Image (cartoon, helix red, strand yellow):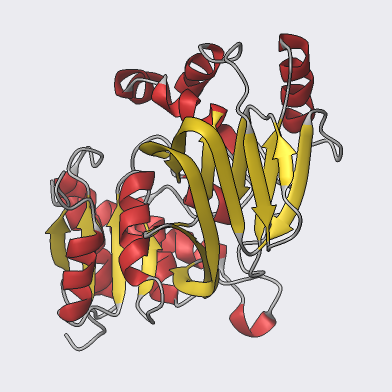
Amino acid sequence: MTGPRSAVVYNPVKVTDLDLLRRTINEGLAQAGWPEPEWLETSPEDPGRGVATKAMENGAELVFVSGGDGTVMAVVDALAGTDVALAVLPAGTGNLLAANLGLSTDAATGVQVALEGGRRRIDVGVAGEQSFVVMAGMGFDAQMLEGTSETAKKHVGWIAYVGGALKHLRDRPMRVIISLDGKPALHRRPRSVIVGNVGRLQGGVRLLSEADPADGKLDVAILSPRSLAQWAALGWAVVRNRERIPAMETYTAAKVEIRSARPQPRQLDGDLIEPGKSMSIGVRHRALLLCVPQPDSDPDLAYDASAADRAAEEVRAAAEEGK
């Protein structure tokens, strides 16, 4: 076979049926005339960046990633700034990038989308030496993640985060100084500062309605509820997708500096990082080449959903026969 070379980076903890995933991807590529991909497993020592780099060194033009948000983030870290395309095949409970960009959670469909050639360049956020594509945060959002067990996430999915949130609603606010693109600093006492490349949280809830992952800017939300009633009003407005959300300020910037008086919990793309007193966040404009469904709006690039679904169904059937 003479098609482009590809690789699969997978997290063995998140992928529940590796044999089925292997058959699904191999069958989809074979039907398109592509050679079998290189299979690379992540580990606690290398959550994805190292093996994704190895895939590129071995000539991969397309990298599939199957795992949770942390695995995706690690692979993005390797691929950002290159012309190697990323195809996300979600596993785990968060899958925030897939939810925000309309990527299928079905592996067979994800393979077909990658093969059809729909590509979109999106921005990549940078916090220190780490990359993110969804959101970075300090304060309550990281506390919520910290208070949510892996067991609960496996059993009830994203709803488990509600329990983690309830544990910290009454915690003390932070005292922070926020600088946006070098403008005069904002002195605030918020519960959370969230810096988003896209707008949706767990469960499809849209927090940042104007966020655009390709505009070269990051959207900043400063959440400052002072009581349970204000938390309830904020949550209701977010769920109802209201234009004005109480106890929340929003800004846009390409460079965000957050400094706190005390160490605070922090997160990148739904994964906790070490607590700290500061976050320095920037953006790499359109640094990541992502596989997406081809847009309906352009007749020359029309995405034939029915054809893709038929192709995916053929791949699924072949994979199931291989059991």
The residue positioned farthest toward the right in the image shown: 244
Q: Is 232 displayed left or right of 284 in the figure?
A: right
Q: Is residue 291 above or below residue 105?
A: below
Residue under the image location 61 percent in, 11 percent down: 170
The residue positioned farthest toward the front in the image shown: 261
Give the total of numbered labels: 0
Residue under the image location 69 percent in, 60 percent down: 253
Q: Percent position (x, y) of residue 2?
A: 20, 89
The quarter of the picture where residue 273 lies is top left
Residue under the image location 17 percent in, 63 percent down: 51
Q: Percent position (x, y) of residue 288?
A: 46, 71
Q: Is residue 207 visible?
A: no
In front of the other: 150 or 157: 150
Q: Identify the image quadrant of the C terminus.
A: top left
Q: Percent position (x, y) of residue 235?
A: 72, 24
Q: Percent position (x, y) of residue 200?
A: 61, 43
Q: Is residue 284 above or below residue 244?
A: below
Q: Is residue 129 visible?
A: yes
Q: Is 194 displayed left or right of 38 in the figure?
A: right
Q: Identify the image quadrant of the N terminus.
A: bottom left
